[in-house]
Structures are given as C-alpha cells and as structure tokens.
Amino acid sequence: MKSHGAIMNEMKMTFPSLSENERFARMAVSGFLSQLNPQINDLSDVKTAVSEAVTNCIVHAYRDTVGKIDLSAKIFADGTIYIRIKDSGCGIANIPQAMEPLFTTAPDEERAGLGFAIMESFMDKLRVNSRLGKGTTVVMSKRIQTKHAAAKADG
Amino acid sequence: MGVEIKTAGQKLFAFLSGELDHHTAKEMRCEIDIACTRELPKELYLDFSKITFMDSSGIGLVMGRYKLMCERKGRVYIQNPPPAIRRVMQVAGISRLARMIERIDTPEETSPETAVEATAEASLPANSVETPTEQQI
C-alpha cells in the first residue's frame, strides 16, 4: 500500500442492516469528512459510494435477515480517505461477476446492478473481499481535494 | 419529500423530491405507478430538480418505469437533474433508456421562451428609468 502519511483521524461505527441506516451511514461519513473541508463534488461522490456499499449489505448480504454492519473510516495526512464496510452475511460466490455492470441477483426489487460500478467510478480504489457464508468486506479510498488545497493550487 | 403528480393531456409529470435511495425508492415508484395506471400517459416526465441525493436505486427506479412505459408504447423523460445526480445517471448510461431534458415544464407554468421574453420586457422600463437618473447625477 502506498504511504499516505500518518493517520490524522479515524472513526468506527456499527449499526443493524435496516434500510433507514443507508441515509444515516452516508450522513455520518459526510459529517466525519467535513473536517477536511472537501469540495461538494468529492463529498457527494463519497456519499454515493457509501450508500451503494451499505445498500449491498442490506439487500444482498442480509437478504431476509437483519445483521450487523461495521463501518470505519480513516483520514490520512495527504488527504486520502479510506472507508471500510464489513458485513457478516451470505458472502459473494463470484466477485468478478458481481462487479459486472448490470449484473444483479435482485431484479425483482428493481436493483440496477450498478452498485460496484458506481463505487469504482466515484472512488479512486475499490477492493472487495468475500467468503461464502462468512461475509464481505469492501474497502475504498479516495484522495480528497480540499478547498484549502484547491485555493493554493489556484494561487 | 415524496412525489407530486401533475398531468397535461397525454403527459404525466412526477416531481420527485428529497433523497432517493433504496429506502425511499419503493414508496416513490409506488406513487408513480399508481398515477400511471390511473392516467395511462403516453409520456412520463420524471423531474429530479428537487432530488438532493441519489444512488443506483434511482437508476433502478428509472429502469423500472422505462419497462412499464415500453409495455404501453410510451416514453420516459428525465427532467432537470442537478449536477451530482446527472453524474450518477451518466455512469449508468441512462441515456439509452430515457431522454434527458433541461426545462421547467409544468402544466401551469409558462414555457421557458415566454419566461425569457417576459424578463426582457420587464428589464426595459427599469433601464429607461436608470438612464435619466445617471444623467441627473
């Protein structure tokens, strides 16, 4: 892993896989990142990616049950953020297939099959680890262009 | 937050507002589908101007309405998406399903052309008042 400097701040939270918590999770991450004074575009990208990852846990990992979702986030000195979203649900049998745009196992619920595609395009890096019957962990990172940095670059 | 429905002839306008995610999508699509079943429109306009957040659940919503409208030989239009929502739509390649249009097109309100003309006319008297004031100074 490339060095991003020291960890400046970090947070961890655990919540049940209720769909009400999709909004809570992205708002919590957004609030945590506000200390970086991020640009609106970056913040909106991260919120969308978090929403996709948490929705996957709710819709797929814990399909007919309610389980725990662990979310943690770290801010590094160079402005890179890491977000890890972990469930202990059913796991993914075929990760490359699951990540293919438009592939979904829940078409009846009008899932577009674009969750991973959106995480990939809105974040810089995405890593997915999964074990059948054990759960899935998604780690994504993005270098946040802070307003301070943008102002310096312009000046 | 929710859906406001307006109709004009064969057109049905659904003004969506608030945050569109997996949690809220179900209710929104239900309201749209009830209105569509009742009105049987030829054109469905989904207005996103008051949507403050959207993830791929919104894409699912558009895809689902596209299928329903196709069955009735109708069309779906996406109206006024804010920049962040437009980005999600572009990643999803939604232009294959629905046309994206920029306009404020409600049954009651005036068309954009009329609105521009009205503004231009209104600004004329203001200018003519300003000019003499400057001359006086």
Image (tube, helix red, strand yellow):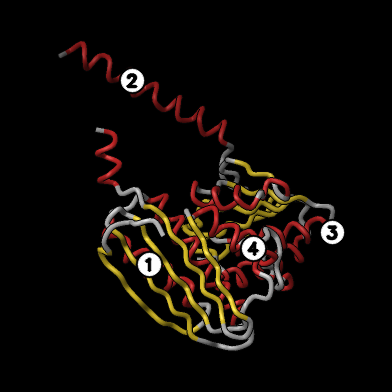
The residue shown at (66%, 64%) is A96
* Circle nearer the viewer, 3 or 1: 1
Mark 2 and mark 1 on one chain? no
* Circle nearer the viewer, 1 or 4: 4
| Residue labelled with disc 4 | A99
Q: How crowded is mark 4: few (under 14 residues within 10 Å), some or many (20 or more)?
A: some
Q: Which of B33 and A32 is in front in this view?
A: A32
Q: Mark 1 lies on which chain?
A: A
Alpha carbon separation for disc pair 3 and 4:
29 Å
**Does dot 2 land on a helix, a strand or a loop?**
helix
User: Is A21 located above or below residue A142 in the figure?
Assistant: below
**Does dot 1 land on a helix, a strand or a loop?**
helix
| Residue labelled with disc 2 | B127
Mark 2 and mark 4 on one chain? no
Q: Residues within 10 Å of mark 1 (few under 14, many from 20)?
A: some
Q: What residue type is labelled 2?
A: Asn
Residue B71 numbered tag: 3
Residue A35 appears in which quarter of the rendering?
A: bottom left
Alpha carbon separation for disc pair 2 and 4:
59 Å
If you read the primary sequence from the N terminus, does the residue marked by circle 3 or circle 2 appear first? 3
Q: Nearer the viewer, residue A45 or A20?
A: A45
Q: Which amino acid does label 4 sit on?
A: Met
| Residue labelled with disc 1 | A29
**Does dot 4 land on a helix, a strand or a loop?**
helix
